Image (tube, rainbow, N blue to C red):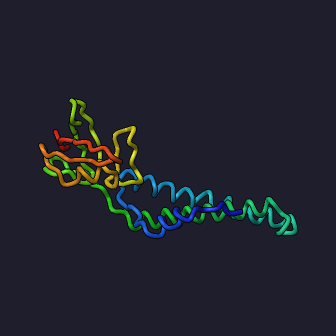
Amino acid sequence: MRLPTRKKELERQQTEEPDLHFTPEKIEAMKRELQRLIDTERGVAAAEVVRTGEMGDFSENAGYQWAKQNLRRVNGRILSLTEKINHAIPIIHEVGSTRVRIGSIVTVKLEPGSATYTYEILGSQESNPMKGKISHHSPIGKALLGAEIGDAADVQVGDRTTRYTVLAIN
């Protein structure tokens, strides 16, 4: 059984370009997962399809239907990982860069006030705002890209504008 998908979600998937910026560590993790899926999970899932298929009537065989769905899931994940790995754009962390770019670690001062934050600008697949890793597609990431030390970046979120001043780029 397929879960329903909202119309807006389908439109977003069709129009949005996938973000293929990954750190070398993430690319290696995807390669390990792909190898594991090919070496173990796909074989186990295919064997289960054969085993449950021998139980009789395919239309009434819930175990067979589940096994087929699981094999489709594994094959879909293999296809997805293969595409991501083949088209990945590695994020290279450049020490000494004078401008904020994807891969930079940026220390900013929030104005008004004196709070400082450190963000690592990454691809959207690896963002984790709770750990200071933000996407280059996020409002803050977009505003900071291309900034130099001392530059101020205004971030508009809803009806509020917040100013971030770049203190350091690592």
- Relative to residue 1, is residue 130 drawn left or right? left
Q: How many marks?
A: 0
* Residue 47 visible in image: no
What is the residue that sits farthest to the top in this orientation?
114
| Residue at 35%, 58% in the rendered image | 21
Residue sitting nearer the eye, 5 or 93: 5
Q: Where is residue 5 in the image (x, y as percent from the top left)?
A: 60, 62
Above-or-below relation of 48 to 59:
above
Q: Where is residue 71 in the image (x, y as percent from the top left)?
A: 66, 63
What is the residue that sits farthest to the front in this orientation?
159
- Relative to residue 146, is residue 1 drawn left or right? right
Q: Where is residue 144 in the image (x, y as percent from the top left)?
A: 23, 50
Q: Which quadrant of the structure image shows residue 78?
A: bottom right
* Residue 58 visible in image: yes
| Residue at 52%, 63% in the rendered image | 8
Query: Quick one: quadrant of the C terminus?
Result: top left
Above-or-below relation of 51 to 140:
below
- Relative to residue 59, is residue 45 drawn left or right? left
| Residue at 87%, 69% in the rendered image | 57
Residue sitting nearer the eye, 43 or 55: 55
Residue sitting nearer the eye, 169 or 14: 14
| Residue at 80%, 66% in the rendered image | 53
Q: Where is residue 142 in the image (x, y as percent from the top left)?
A: 28, 54
Query: Quick one: quadrant of the N terminus?
Result: bottom right
